[in-house]
Image (cartoon, rainbow, N blue to C red):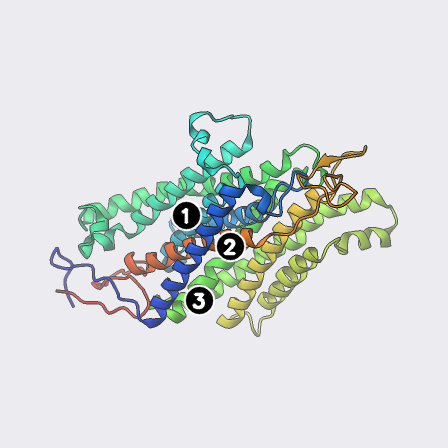
Amino acid sequence: MASRDHSIRFAIPEFKTAGKLWITLLGLLMVVGLSAWVYQFTQGLIVTGMRNVFSWGLYIMLFVLFVGLSAGGLIISSAPKFFHSQRYKGLARIGVLLSLACITVAGLLILPDIGRSNLVYQFFTSPDFRSPMVWDFGVVVLYGLLNVWYLWLLTRRDLAAHGSRLAFGTEDTEAGRERDRKLAFWTAALALPAAVTLHSVTGWIFATQMGRGSWFSPLVAPVFIAKALVSGLGLLLVVAILANRFTRFRADRDDLVSLGRVLGIFLAFHVVYLLAAERLPHAWAENFDFLAIMSNFLLGTTPYFWLWTVVGGALPLALLAIPSVRKRVPVIFAASALAVFGVVFEGIQLVFTGYNTVNIAAQPGVTVGGQYEGIAPDIWATAGSYTPTLIEFAVTLGVISFGALIFTLGLKYIPIQHSENRSEPAAVADGGEQETS
């Protein structure tokens, strides 16, 4: 076994055919997305499905989703470190890398939504601190930098031990390890409230919108935190299982089973308790008949409600609650994927319920930004409707592909596999061979 010294060099694994095809696919999707973004920038937001009466669309829906994915992933990765626990240590690095990729996607999705993305610098030069969007943008930027620092801190020892340039000249010494442990604790102590703040502020952006009664609730921030925990942990389990299958990353089965149970608890709290806490008072206020109350409580108003609560809520909760199947990795994978699927449609449900009814009693309403068709004008409306255009789908697909590329290259260049008592590099790219000299 090679000893840890400066003669050891960090051998970067080479991608095999599947890995190269994956990188090529991501690159092509990024080109398509960038082209669509340029087209939208030159033509304006008129090429999207958004109008004045429905001003938040696919970009904001996915922004909320990826902020939650990032926040939830970092909470799961940093909580054991803060409490000096060795549980889930093998998933900490991949969790932080995933959090970094997700917050990058979330931050980039802000740019096409604001239309004039060339003016984004004004967030820094002339911020209006009365706007929660300014606070959210600032938290997103700081949160991304925190992820970069935390990921480097967790991997610095292996990077230094194997002579990687990413160690920035630091060495693997006992004093350095002790310093890393202390810094990791304090970084985790900062990461936990930062993650909670990030998604709480995102929720408050919705809650503070004038004239959107369905968003005005003191439960908005707790609901956002709960779905961040569900989606973040769900995505972490999905990615860890896939990495375990298709790369040299090895996830501990006991950790997967244990986190599957935790996901079940998060699902129960989110889909059962918080949903009841939010909907039951409204149902009771509308009708004092018991059957009518239960009907109003249980029946959703849109298909998105059922996709969230049943397909993405009750079904994965049942899979994780049945003792005979909940310890099987394929079942954990399916339940985790369904949980993320459910949170996607919860976000769609959230935006649509806010815009379907505009609180304007008198005609003609507000302008939708459209044009006249035939004799009757179509520029006035009191209720919104929205269908994403191909341009929006292309832009979002390109941005998500960029996030996937960050994660993929992280597996290639960063020692994601915890290498306690090992001398070999721990980068886990597809089919790589490790060499020492």
List the single residue furthest toward the bottom: 324
In front: label 1 or label 2: 2
Q: Are marks 1 and 2 in contact (CB under 8 Å)?
A: no
Q: State whether residue 153 appears in this view.
A: yes
Q: Are marks 2 and 3 in contact (CB under 8 Å)?
A: no
Q: Quadrant of the N terminus?
A: bottom left
- Residue bearing the label numbered 3: 241
For residue 338, above or below residue 214: below
Residue depicted at x 42% and y 38%: 141
Residue 370: image x %, image y %?
67, 41
Q: Quadrant of the C terminus?
A: bottom left
Residue depicted at x 36% and y 55%: 93
Q: State whether residue 401 appears in this view.
A: no
Residue depicted at x 70% and y 46%: 353
Nearer to me, 124 or 163: 124
Estimate the spatial distance between the alpha carbons at disc 1 and disc 3, rounded to whole Å: 25 Å
> Callout 3: helix, strand or loop?
helix
Q: Which badge, 1 or 3, comes first in the chain's sequence? A: 1
- The kind of residue on which mark 3 rests is Ile
> Callout 2: helix, strand or loop?
helix
Q: Which badge, 1 or 2, comes first in the chain's sequence? A: 1
- Residue bearing the label numbered 1: 83
Estimate the spatial distance between the alpha carbons at disc 1 and disc 2, rounded to whole Å: 42 Å
Residue 306: image x %, image y %?
70, 59
Residue 393: image x %, image y %?
54, 54
**Is 338 on the left or on the right of 99, as rendered?**
right
- The kind of residue on which mark 1 rests is Phe
**Is 192 on the left or on the right of 305, as rendered?**
left
**Is 250 on the left or on the right of 389, as rendered?**
left
In front: label 2 or label 3: 2
